[in-house]
Amino acid sequence: MTRWAWAGVSAAAIQHNVREIAGVAGPAQVWAVVKADGYGHGAELAARAALAGGAQGLCVALVQEGVALRAAGVEGPILVLSEQPAAQTRAALDADLQLTVYGREGVTAIADAGGMGHPVHLKIDTGMRRVGAHTNAAVAVAAEIEASPATALAGVFTHLAVADEPDNPYTEHQLDRFDDVLATLHAAGHHPPLVHAANSSGALAHPRARYDMVRAGIAIYGISPGPGVDHLCTELRPALSLHARVAHVKRVTAGERISYGLRHGFDRDTTVATLPLGYADGVPRRLHAVGGAVLVGGQPRPIVGVVTMDQLMVDCGDDEVAVGDEAVLIGSQGGHTITAADWAERLDTIAYEIVCGISARVERRPV
């Protein structure tokens, strides 16, 4: 059963992007972030491609994500980036996932689950104000980790809030605080093997943030982390494209209206092609209202009417179009290109949300 809507994912592009980031960030290690089903690209495919491209480890957000990679046979270090419910700790240990801790509770959960010398990374909140140990608590937590036979201090890290804004001084402020924490840890006799702070933007734009490793997420998929670092992403290759085949063609006349709410009216006779995917597949419902288009026959075709759950319609004018013709929603056709960033700009969001929003019912096909 082959659906007439699919996403193409290029392992070669991911490998290329990892090599590009490694070339910029070296000698720091690259650990590829493959959470959220590989940012919508397929976690197993993304993980294998990243490792083949030279990544020395992987990062996930959930224990379940790491367990699924192990079940698929993916090897290499996998770090869970935040503390998880204590009830999941045993599964994490069984899957040999490195765990993040912020305090005594995280260490206790590993001990209670039977951990022995299990590698953990201490996360420090230097200003993101999301999760992590307070800077003043770093030494105490590190001491808890190293005093327990259940845990071993494998790393210390933080996360940068505005690294995609290279001129924003807040990143330097965070790194100053982080360096102060590291100095205090070292003075107390704690020497973590891995120190890391850089996300994709940090790896590309902030040499000081690279430390021993960088956690590269969106950039390994060939997508810029933000306009402020676009100029540093010119060598990256988008790994994902989104396609469909025309499922229905009809001729409409001037004055007719289309889709729910009849919000779009036609001022001329035209040909409308229906594509068999909609907002349940990750095409935002209001994309029609912000000038969204689809490539059919090598030309941009405006989306007309509200995007529905399973279908959307495009205006093809008087051009020939037939059932089965390929449409490109994200990607290239006939010399034209539509990117996830194009959608994001129109929808006042970020490209991360676009690719992560492509739902599981859209088949990912290696290309």
Image (spheres, grey):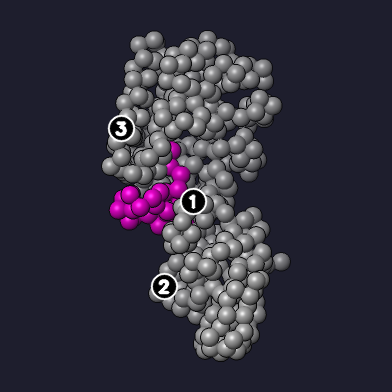
Q: What percent of the width, then of the height, locates residue 184?
A: 36, 14
For residue 259, which quarter of the picture?
bottom right
**N-terminal of the two: label 3 or label 2?**
3
Q: Kindly identify the residue that appears in the image at 57 percent across and 61 percent down.
A: 284
**N-terminal of the two: label 2 or label 1?**
2
User: Disc count in the image?
Assistant: 3
Task: Confirm or deny contact between disc 3 and disc 2 (CB under 8 A).
Answer: no
Residue 264 visible in the current orientation:
yes
Instruction: Classify residue 254 as left or right of residue 233.
Output: right
Q: Relative to residue 310, is residue 205 depicted above or below?
A: above
Instruction: Classify residue 10 as left or right of residue 205.
Output: right
Q: Kindly identify the residue that appears in the image at 48 percent across and 59 percent down.
A: 347
Instruction: Classify residue 218 as left or right of residue 177.
Output: right
Per the image, the residue denoted by label 1 is 352
Q: What percent of the width, then of the height, locates residue 78?
A: 53, 34
Per the image, the residue denoted by label 2 is 336
Per the image, the residue denoted by label 3 is 172
For residue 126, which quarter of the picture?
top left
| Three-letter code for the amino acid on which mark 2 is drawn | His
The answer for how far apart the CA atoms under marks 3 and 2 are is: 40 Å
User: Residue 23 colored magenta?
Assistant: no
Q: What stretch is highlighted in magenta?
A: 214-239
| Three-letter code for the amino acid on which mark 3 is drawn | Glu
Point out the frontmost of discs 3 and 2.
Answer: 3
Q: Relative to residue 261, is residue 362 depicted above or below?
A: above
Q: What percent of the width, then of the height, locates residue 85?
A: 65, 28
- Name the foreground residue: 72 vs 210: 210
